[in-house]
Amino acid sequence: MTSIAFFGLGNMGGPMAANLIKAGHQVCVFDLFPEAVDKLVALGATTATTPELVVKNADVVISMLPAGKHVFDLYLGDNGLVKALKPNTLVIDSSTIDSATAIKTAQGLKSHKIHFIDAPVSGGVAGASAGTLSFMVGGAESNFASAKPLLDVMGKNIFHAGEVGAGQVAKACNNMLLSILMVGTSEALQLGIDNGLDPKVLSEIMSNSSGSNWTLDVYNPCPGVSEGVPSSNNYQGGFMTDLMAKDLGLAMDTAVQSHSSTPLGGLTRSLYALHQKSGNGKKDFSSIFEQFSQKN
Ligand code: NAD
């Protein structure tokens, strides 16, 4: 049993913390929303009045927060936890943030003998609830090994991508590719429809040909082609356009820093920004199909 402090009990962090409790760990939780805390306390978590008290007995701290500034502030801001953590505490940040902030946070904590890994996830709310997330970890081998038993409770595929920051880079690459595939699949399906093809027939042809890819085969963006996917439920549930737009921004920041050429990533980021601005931020990211299917 490990003594864990868990910060950020939203759509993802709530079920992740619940799985740790179910596995028998001692979990002390904190969120800015008291209702989110209450839900976890009902499942067996403890809590405390201040973040400092939440980490008092913690050997491991896990955070699942909206963005890089929240993560840096939690640990190293004016009232940062760095002053309250015991030496040798392991910090696992699973938020999706830029790798530069992950590295800066790791360095700030290291000078206080606190270990840090970045461990962003893929798999969405369904994966968080089922304990089947994929974790992409950046950090020292020894810290990865210490974190692995806990990550195994919350996930199914646990990858060690490299040094601190590498998990965030892997996540940015994956989601950039995913969005490019989603846009390409949408574009191809609509081209077929505009030329008289049935999208179900076209999907079957392409799925069994060289155009086969996850967004076509498993997560088809055209309503009515597949059952049980967001496109057949008015694009509700799944992975929000707002979150994909955020991840594409992180991918572009990463590309700028490494002087990488990402023309398709850049174009896809613009398409998702446009889609967001048209009021589709809360819809699943496969709703980008509507940008192609809309009739003027
Ligand atoms: P969310 O907005 O539902 O939850 C974030 C929670 O963090 C909120 O409850 C908020 O009150 C809390 N919080 C903010 N600052 C805090 C602080 N200082 N101390 C304690 N709690 C604090 O977001 P989410 O959907 O759970 O996503 C969390 C992270 O996971 C994000 O970085 C997101 O990009 C990433 N992610 C989300 C999904 C998804 O499908 N939702 C999938 C993969 C990755």
Image: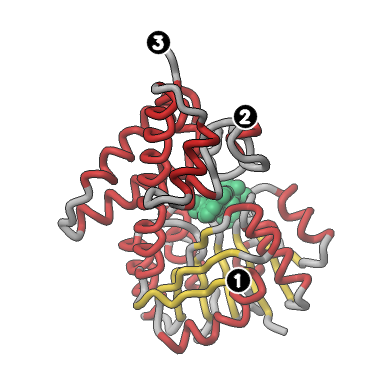
**Observer able to see residue 272:** no
Do the CB atoms of the residues marked 3 and 2 lie less than 8 Å apart? no
**Residue 181 shows which numbered tag?**
none
Q: Which of marks 3 and 1 is nearer the N terminus?
A: 1
The mark that comes first in sequence, 1 or 2, is: 1
Quadrant where the N terminus sits is: bottom right
Q: Residue furthest top?
A: 296
Question: Horizontal and vertical percent for residue 102?
Answer: 38, 65
Residue occupied by mark 1 = 156
Residue 239 placed where, x, y %?
A: 55, 45
Please name the residue that numbered disc 2 is placed on. Answer: 234
- Label 3 or label 1, whichever lies nearer to me, is 3
Cα distance, mark 3 to mark 1?
45 Å
SS for callout 1: strand
Residue type marked 2: Asn
Q: Residue at x 44, y 18 (%)?
A: 294
- Say what amino acid the circle numbered 1 marks: Lys
Q: Do the residues labelled 3 and 1 touch (CB within 8 Å)?
A: no
Which residue position is annotated with label 3? 296
Amino acid tagged 3: Asn
Secondary element at image label 2 = loop
